[in-house]
Image: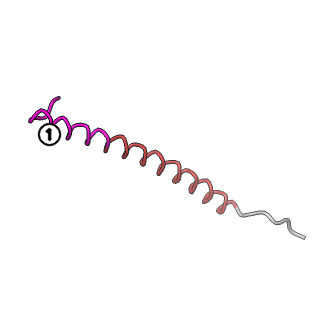
Amino acid sequence: MPTLTSPPECENRSKLSQKIAALEGRVSVLHQITFAAFIGRAELFSRDGFASQ
């Protein structure tokens, strides 16, 4: 009787899915950092009347 194992394609898909999820998490963090930096620069602009660099 054959053993019940998943084919290699399923394992590869699972690993790929995990990698995609990890990348999505990183992109989310980078987006939050970028957005926070944008908001900070917008506050500088409105407070000073010009974009401080």
Instruction: Tell me: 17 left or right of 28.
Output: right
For residue 21, side relative to residue 11 (left or right): left
Where residue 13 appears, as percent x and y from the top left, is 60, 60
Residue at image position (57%, 55%) is: 16
Q: Position of residue 37 (x, y in %)?
A: 29, 38
As drawn, the residue found furthest toward the left would be 49
Q: Is residue 11 shown above or below 2?
A: above
Give the number of callouts.
Answer: 1
Q: Residue at x 66, y 62 (%)?
A: 10
Percent across and percent down for residue 45 are 15, 37
Percent of width and height locating residue 40: 25, 37
Q: Residue at x 64, y 62 (%)?
A: 9
Q: Is residue 10 magenta?
A: no
In magenta, the rendered stretch is: 36-53
> Taken as a whole, is the magenta stretch helix, strand or loop?
helix
Residue projecting furthest to the right: 1
- Near-viewer residue (13 or 22): 22
SS at mark 1 in the image:
helix
Q: Which residue is mark 1?
A: 46
Q: Quadrant of residue 52?
A: top left
Q: Quadrant of the C terminus?
A: top left
Q: Residue at x 31, y 45 (%)?
A: 35
Q: Is residue 18 above or below residue 41?
A: below
- Say whether residue 12 is left or right of residue 25: right
Amino acid at dot 1: Ser
Q: Is residue 38 magenta?
A: yes
Give the crowd class for mark 1: few <14, some 14-19, many >=20 residues within 10 Å: few
* Residue nearest the observer in this picture, 34 or 19: 34
- Above or below residue 13? Residue 32 is above
Q: Nearer the viewer, residue 51 or 46?
A: 46
